[in-house]
């Protein structure tokens, strides 16, 4: 039974989202205790402070203060497949967004190539449409960028610009149907309540194709793990595009425009592009490749209970566990290697929370003799796509899904 989200609920609790935000724009440097976290990254600075200075967030890895880039601490992923709301990662392009969105004046506009433009109140969004619920991983296209060698420009995310949640909302299709999409519609463009800082900067907008927008799964979400959205994750409404990179998941969603021409806005037409090569992989210095937009997620898997540098007792039965996701389809299998990828052992998959969700895996192993070992974990999705063994590199640092290696020693 889906939790009831009522207008009253959201109004009464909206102030939660504002706590502490007044001071956020004034923060230039973290003013809190400097507990540092080691991201195990080479080729540049590899540590970051942990911060609990942001509203509705517990300790997060601080990548940048304003606009906030906050990473989910990796040990969170060992505790379950759903990332708690107060540890769901945060990323914004522009620092100018409301610290207390006013629900009374909030409107979601639906306009463009439609028969009947709409201006929906939060009350109408909550009450006038069917509800849907699904689990889906939100992952920044630049997740794990810090591990690309040589390093590339952009947020130096380790593996924590991804999070999984159970999303509750209404199908985008239902809203588009109410507006009545005209024949000849090509794309749907989404914008939020955030504003550019410099007038010449392009507003952050993203578009998806009309058929994708009407697939019944793309969702306007107001609920996240049974709660309202945290402010920094897009309160009061967030576009959820299951299986696609989080860059499409517009936060503080306020505008939906149906286009009868391809979107020419910077962020759709030019930004967020990767090489049109297998796994988006190229060599530094290469330039003979085409760029294509980042779109769907690709399979990934992680060991969450063992970290590089750990020592394991020789011969002792040892538990390995972690998470995996298939990308834009489910997880078919997750395999573990104890010998740097020569041999692979099957693992047991945990509960299936839906094909876009994290899935837990676990197994037991023993390291036969003293020495150093490279543990590797590999996800194969239900389309038969497996993670590659070679390191992926591209100039923007997008869509890395190389098999993860954990260096341990048996003693
Ligand atoms: N309105 C708005 N939505 C946005 C963005 C933004 O800058 N503004 N950034 C996008 C990117 S690149 C990412 S990775 C996700 C981050 O979502 P989160 O902060 O809820 O984790 O939001 C996406 N939606
Ligand atoms: Mo992102």
Image (spheres, grey):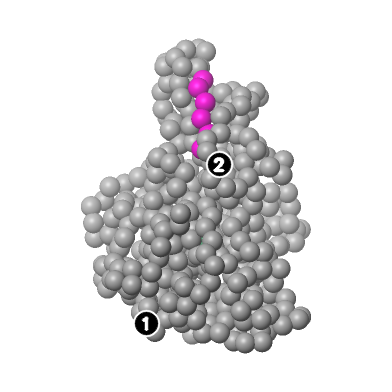
* Residue farthest front in this picture: 1
Q: Who comes first in sequence, dot 2 or dot 1?
A: 1
Q: Nearer the viewer, residue 286 or 231?
A: 231
In this rendering, is residue 8 above or below 356? below
Q: Nearer the viewer, residue 322 or 290?
A: 322
Identified at 61% across, 61% down, the residue is: 217
* Image coords of residue 60 (percent x, y): 35, 53
In this rendering, is residue 354 above or below 360? below
In this rendering, is residue 295 above or below 172? above
* Image coords of residue 234 (percent x, y): 43, 67
Residue 248 visible:
no
Q: CA distance from mark 2 to mark 1?
A: 39 Å
Q: Secondary structure at mark 2?
A: loop
Q: Which residue is mark 1?
A: 104
Label 1 environment density (alpha carbons within 10 Å; few <14, some 14–19, many ≥20): few
Label 2 environment density (alpha carbons within 10 Å; few <14, some 14–19, many ≥20): few
Identified at 43% across, 41% down, the residue is: 80
Q: Which mark is residue 352?
A: 2
Highlighted magenta segment, given as a residue range: 360-365
* Residue 97, magenta (yes or no): no
């Amino acid at each position: 039974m889906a939790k009831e989200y009522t207008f009253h609920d959201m109004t009464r609790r909206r102030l939660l989202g504002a706590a502490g935000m007044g001071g956020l724009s004034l923060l230039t440097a973290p003013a809190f205790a400097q507990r540092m976290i080691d991201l195990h990254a080479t080729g540049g600075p590899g540590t970051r402070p942990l911060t609990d200075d942001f509203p509705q967030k517990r300790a997060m890895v601080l990548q940048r203060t304003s606009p906030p880039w906050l990473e989910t601490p990796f040990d969170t992923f060992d505790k379950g497949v759903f990332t708690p709301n107060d540890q769901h990662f945060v990323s914004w392009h522009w620092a100018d967004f409301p610290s207390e969105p006013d629900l009374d004046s909030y409107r979601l506009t639906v306009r463009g190539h439609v028969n009947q433009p709409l201006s929906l109140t939060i009350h109408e969004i909550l009450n006038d449409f069917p509800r849907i619920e699904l689990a889906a991983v939100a992952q920044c296209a630049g997740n794990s960028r810090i591990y690309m060698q040589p390093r590339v420009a952009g947020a130096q995310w380790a593996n924590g610009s991804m999070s999984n949640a159970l999303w509750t909302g209404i199908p985008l299709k239902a809203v588009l149907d109410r507006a009545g999409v005209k024949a000849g519609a090509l794309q749907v463009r989404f914008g939020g309540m955030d504003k550019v800082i410099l007038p010449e900067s392009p507003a952050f907008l993203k578009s998806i194709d009309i058929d994708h927008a009407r697939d019944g799964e793309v969702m306007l979400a107001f609920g996240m793990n049974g709660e309202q959205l945290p402010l920094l994750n897009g309160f009061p409404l967030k576009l959820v595009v299951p299986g696609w990179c989080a860059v499409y998941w517009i936060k503080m969603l306020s505008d939906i425009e149906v286009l009868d021409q391809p979107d020419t806005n910077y962020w759709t037409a030019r930004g967020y592009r990767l090489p049109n090569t297998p796994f988006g992989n190229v060599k530094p210095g290469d330039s003979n490749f085409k760029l294509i937009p980042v779109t769907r997620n690709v399979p990934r898997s992680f060991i969450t209970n063992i970290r590089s540098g750990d020592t394991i007792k020789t011969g002792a039965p040892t538990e390995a566990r972690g998470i995996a996701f298939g990308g834009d389809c489910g997880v078919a299998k997750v395999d573990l290697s104890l010998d740097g990828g020569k041999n692979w052992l099957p693992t047991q998959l945990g509960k299936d929370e839906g094909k876009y969700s994290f899935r837990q895996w676990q197994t037991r192993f023993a390291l036969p003799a003293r020495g150093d070992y490279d543990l590797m974990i590999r996800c194969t999705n239900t389309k038969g796509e497996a993670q590659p063994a070679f390191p992926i590199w591209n100039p923007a640092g997008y869509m890395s899904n190389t098999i993860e290696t954990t260096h341990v020693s048996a003693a």
